[in-house]
Every structure is written in structure tokens, then in C-alpha cells.
Image (spheres, rainbow, N blue to C red):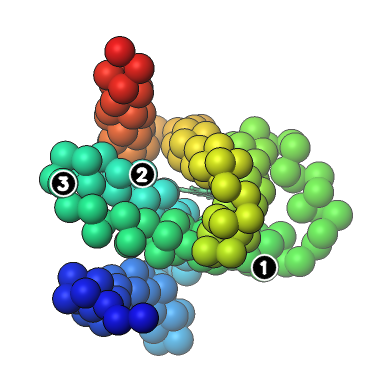
Amino acid sequence: MSLNPEDKTIAFVIKPILFTVCLVPFITLVIGAVNNTLGTNPVETMTHETGEWTLRFLLLTLMITPLRRLSGKSWLIKLRRMLGLYAFFYACLHFITYIWFDQYFDWMEVVRDIPKRPFITVGFTAFVLLIPLAVTSNNKMIRLLKKNWVKLHKLVYVIAVLGVLHFLWLVKADTLEPLIYASILLILLGYRAYYQRRKNI
Ligand code: HEM
């Protein structure tokens, strides 16, 4: 099968560049951990960085469809899966940081902590909901699930709402940052509702 020039640029230029750029926060964390430059509380830095990157990648994933519609650049859709999988990757790192450095692999304590602290309950729910999306993100599953795939992947909106709620819930004083994420999400949800309404008229 021969690729047209646009597909070649996406496959051999844009995707590898994006893949590398998305790895930068992870590499920065690893270098910081090895060189002991993650500040006075390295675990806190790791939790914060991985949590925020999960949310950023979730929102970037949700931005692809509106950007594609508004710009007419249909190739943008080919980057969505990678961004979504990066959201899952950073969520896994975030969860591992919690299990490892917050709970020291004390599974009984984890089971007690998840329902005890509401912001953890919400974050955990978002993480669990991300798993089926990551598992079904390949072409084989898209073909197999057909229309159900689209329905299932709408869960990403619920996950993003839970992610923002999790952040809003855990901050004690400075709510500016979570509110910025909440506003971006609101705009994305608003655009989606507007588009659906126009489509149904
Ligand atoms: C999609 C899933 C999730 C998202 C988007 C997310 C996002 C975030 C964000 C943005 C922060 C704050 C970072 C900052 O302060 O700058 C955070 C902190 C945190 N998250 Fe998550 N999270 C998720 C899942 C989880 C899960 C599954 C757990 C554990 C079971 C968890 C535990 C924590 C903890 C312990 C903190 C730090 C709280 C503190 O500073 O006191 N998160 N998360």
C-alpha cells in the first residue's frame, strides 16, 4: 500500500516529533530523580507533574476534533490516539507514584484510602475509566466494536470532568490553576454541545 505525500509527512515527520515532545516531561522527571533536583519534596513534585500532564494530555486529546472542524485539517485526527495514550501513560505514572511513594505498596491501605478521601475516589474512578479506552484504542478494536467504539470513547469527557474535579477538590487555597483547566474543559464541552445542536437542526 503506497502512502500519499500528506500521509507520509504525518507518519514520518509529525508523529515521531510529537511522540518525542510528549516524552519530554517524563524524561525531565527521570533526569531530576537521578540527579536529585526535584526540589525539597521529590514525591510531591512527581505527583504534581504526572497529575498535571495527565490532565493536559486529556484536554489536548479533546481539542483535536474541534481544531480539525474549525481548521479543516483532517489529518489532525491522526494525532488523537497518540495524545490519548500519552494521557493514559502519565495517569499510570501518577498512580504508580501514589502506590509506591504515598502508600509504600501497602495494598490494604490503598483499598482503605481510595473510598476514604473523596478526591482520591474521583481520581481513581477517572483512572479506571481510562483503562478500557486505552485497551480499545487499536485499529482491530475500532473495527470490532464499530458504533460501540464511538459510544465507549465518549467516556473521555466524563474522565476529563472527573480529572478536573479531582484537582479542584485537592487544592486547599490557590484554585486558579484547576479553574483554568475547568474553563478550558467547559469551552470544549460547550463547543461539542453547540456542534451537536447544529447537526440536529
Ligand atoms: C485521570 C486521572 C487523574 C488525573 C487527571 C489526575 C490529576 C491530578 C492533578 C492535576 C493533580 C494536582 C497536581 C498539582 O498539584 O499541580 C493531582 C494530584 C494528586 N493525585 Fe491525581 N489524577 C488522576 C488520578 C489519580 C489517582 C488514580 C490517584 C490515586 C489513587 C491520584 C492521587 C493524587 C494525589 C495523592 C495527588 C496529590 C495530592 C496533594 O497534593 O495533596 N490521582 N492529580
Q: Which mark is residue 100?
A: 1
User: Which residue is under mark 3?
Assistant: 72
Query: Residue 32 sits in which quadrant?
Result: bottom left
Residue 141 picture location, percent across and down: 60, 59
Work out whether mark 3 precedes mark 2 in sequence or the reverse, and give the earlier one.
2
Quadrant where the image shows the C terminus? top left
> Which amino acid lies under the numbered mark 1 shown in the image of this protein?
Trp
Mark number for residue 62?
2
Q: Residue 138 appears in which quarter of the rendering?
A: bottom right
Residue 55 against residue 29 in the figure, above or below:
above
Name the secondary structure under disc 3: loop
The residue that appears at 42% across and 60% down in the rendered structure is 81
Q: Nearer the viewer, mark 2 or mark 1?
A: 2
Whether residue 11 is visible to the viewer of this picture, yes or no, is: yes
Compare marks 2 and 1 and give the one earlier in the sequence. 2
Looking at numbered disc 3 in the image, what kind of residue is underneath it? Gly
Task: Give the distance between the C-alpha atoms of the residues marked 3 and 1, in whole angstroms.
Answer: 45 Å
Residue mark closest to the camera, 3 vs 2: 3
Q: Quadrant of residue 121?
A: top right
Residue 152 or 48: which is nearer the viewer?
152
Total marks drawn?
3
What residue occupies the far front of the structure in this picture? 1
